[in-house]
Amino acid sequence: MECLQEFKGVSGLAVNTTKSNIFTVGIQDNILDEVLAMTEFARGHMPSRYLGISLAGQQLSVTDYSHFLDQITGCIRKWTAKSLSFAGRLELIRSVIQGVECFWLQVFPLPMAVIEMIHRLCRAFLWNSKRAPVAWEDICHPKEDGGLGIRHIQSWNVALLAQVLWNIHCKADTLWAKWVNEVYLRGPHFGTGSRRRAVLHSFDDLPRSGTELSQTLIL
């Protein structure tokens, strides 16, 4: 705890023990008990949440996205009681709801089942729970192509995850990029080496390999 006390002395920031947890792997119970007693932190368990994002030691299941879907549902319910025009509902989907989505899309590759749930929620809200006269895929086209300019979730998800690869490639000298390459990857960049551990689910679920993605990115 000396390092935390030193940090407090330098920055003036203190650790809140009631909001802190310790997550461990492969530690003997007696050692873990000593650590918990010394730090006064509670033991954390996976899955957990950090800044509203679900964290787990393995790839998230559909049920792990329930908090994410609840956020979208909450946005919709907050506005369904009001008399909104079609243009108003469309703008809410484009700004508020897709703003909520962006936070998750840049971290996790969404399962198709979750994407379909989001489509159903947004489709019902946009058309006021009536039968949709236009396919959702057509709505996601740009306005100049006859659509309504709503982002295509799966394509948007890939683009945001690809940005992570771009950052690893172009910011290889930064501490975090060096750590990712050292712990998870082989080779100086994502597309030039093999994965060291099969835990980078965000990368594994991209529809194209790192090499192909790096060829399409502006580096």
Image (spheres, helix red, strand yellow):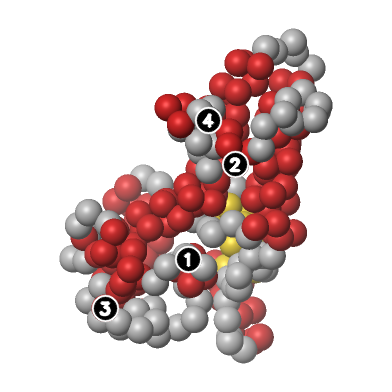
Callout 4: few (<14), some (14-19), or many (20+) C-alpha neighbours within 10 Å? some
Q: Which residue is mark 2?
A: 137
**In the figure, is residue 173 to the left or right of 123?**
left
Q: CA distance from mark 1 to mark 4?
A: 24 Å
Q: Residue at x 64, y 50 (%)?
A: 115
Name the one closer to the observer, 200 or 140: 140
Q: Earlier in the sequence, mark 3 or mark 2?
A: 2
**Amino acid on which the number 2 mark rests in the picture:** Glu
Point out residue 144 in the picture as x, y percentages from the top left corner.
Answer: 42, 27
Name the one closer to the observer, 26 or 207: 207
Q: Which residue is mark 3?
A: 192
Instruction: Give residue 207's mark.
Output: 1
Q: CA distance from mark 3 to mark 2?
A: 35 Å
Callout 2: few (<14), some (14-19), or many (20+) C-alpha neighbours within 10 Å? few
Q: Nearer the viewer, mark 3 or mark 2?
A: 2
Point out residue 148 in the picture as x, y percentages from the top left corner.
Answer: 54, 27
Instruction: Give residue 147's mark.
Output: 4
**Amino acid on which the number 4 mark rests in the picture:** Gly
In the rendered view, would you say 117 is above or below 110? above
